[in-house]
Image (spheres, rainbow, N blue to C red):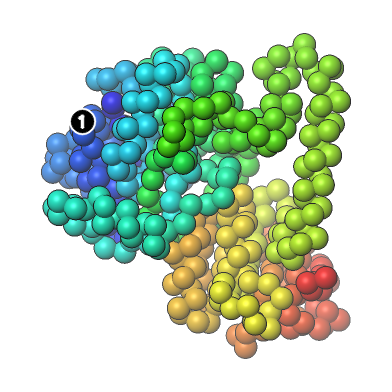
Amino acid sequence: MTLFAVPKPFEGHTGIIQRNAITSWTLLRPRPEIILFGSEPGTKEICEELGLRHVPDIATTELGAPLLDDLFEKAERLAKFDLLAYVNCDIILLNDFLTALRKISRAQPKFFMAGRRWDTPIRALWDFSKEEWEPELLTHVKRSGIQPLPPGNSDYFVFPRGLWRKIAPIALGRGGVDPWLVYEARRLGASVVDTSETVVAIHQNHDQSSNFRRIRQWRKETNANQELVGKEIGKFCLWDATHILTPSGLTRARGVRYFIRRADTLHLFHPRLAAPLKIARSAADHVRSFRKRRSLARNPMFRLGDLVQSKMPADGICAILGLGERSNQVSPAPVCGLDLAYALTRVGSPVVVYDPEATVMEDARGLLGGPVNFAASPEECVSDADVIVLTSPIKEHPDLAAMTPNQSERPRVIIDCCGALNRKSLRAGIEYVGWGKR
């Protein structure tokens, strides 16, 4: 197998977790060929140290996000082996990864392998020199880590050489990659195998903040990915898998959710069936609508997230003041700002967050990923936001009453979850929305 990746700069905690991940790849048996792309600081040095291949040239966006087409095409052309794996550089792999790959490749010559990760706090270099490093790491993951509920996202993709025909120029790290790969693999007749039950892919939690002044550009690149992929293809996920690798072996993907997705997407692969499938697709829409209404009725966080998204412009940014404690069930705030920030970043919506408690901000840095900035003050948090959410009655709220619309003169929205403001004192151009659990 040839494993390829694109590291970030080897600096601070990012450098630690990337070294952990890449070192674990070198310990897979048999050892794969490993190619690292890009010219970020430290990439050349770790390739020389660990005996890896280094390819410095790769096409990127303005913000440095690698382009999927250039990356995958170069990897296929340069790879020594016919099985290729793209893996994010914060993912530690164990030998169950190769065990799964052997089972799948023997049963399905044309396949696409992916699976959910395990989010795990790891702050320091792991000691891989120990003979028992793998079982000790597994124990740490099971004790301290969590695997997000399905369908989730995948941080690794494995496929045979020659699977792809024409790859879309999607920016990595801006959303849309997983859906497009799953859809394209299905369109090309490959078996899409979900290995979430058998592969422990260890994602080391880390601060994924972006440059504060470029977060709106991040949103533009995310929107460009969504436009390129398209609304229907953008919904593809691991519920669209054709097979599941369980501890008992490879099985067909069955169940209500898989059936709904089959009915929902069959017309994309067989356009002539669009009309006959209209009733089945309508039924699937009703099921989804019912589930959404039930979720909104049961969970105030879902309702708040839905409200925020409805108020957000296409390239908007949300500011969240007051994150609160996720485990505190008796907080006077009706919602947890950290949960809201997590939900928004998971769907690619940029957020800026602030809380006066340093421990809360540290917790946020370990949890939140994607387009997020951690503000040093309330004023910095709200300075360029389109939607401002007050989720807890902290004393450091800026003078929002005197605030004017942002520099682009677009209207701003304030969602007050804790009764902190007098709506009559707000200036023109600011929409006030009072919000509570009900």
Residue type (three-letter) at the residue carrying disc 1: Pro
Q: Is residue 324 above or below residue 274?
A: below
Query: Is residue 28 rendered to the left or right of residue 218?
Result: left
Residue 112, image x and y in percent? 46, 25
Residue shown at 48% from the left, 73% from the top: 361
* Nearer the observer, 371 or 252: 252
- For disc 1, the marked residue is 30
Q: Is residue 21 above or below residue 329?
A: above
Picture quadrant where residue 71 is located: top left
Residue 348, image x and y in percent? 59, 49
Quick one: quadrant of the N terminus? top left
Residue shown at 57% from the left, 45% from the top: 150
Quick one: quadrant of the C terminus? bottom right
Query: Is residue 323 rendered to the left or right of residue 12?
Result: right
Q: Is residue 143 above or below residue 188?
A: below
Query: Is residue 248 rendered to the left or right of residue 433?
Result: left
Picture quadrant where residue 401 is located: bottom right
* Nearer the observer, 200 or 22: 200
Q: Is residue 221 visible?
A: no
**Label 1, residues with CA under 10 Å away: few <14, some 14-19, many ≥20:** few
Residue shown at 48% from the left, 62% from the top: 367
Query: Is residue 112 rendered to the left or right of residue 99?
Result: right
Residue 431, image x and y in percent? 82, 68
Residue shown at 72% from the left, 59% from the top: 302
Q: Is residue 339 above or below residue 187?
A: below
Q: Is residue 185 visible?
A: yes
> SS at mark 1?
loop
* Nearer the observer, 154 or 369: 154
Q: Residue furthest top?
A: 272
Residue 355, image x and y in percent? 55, 77
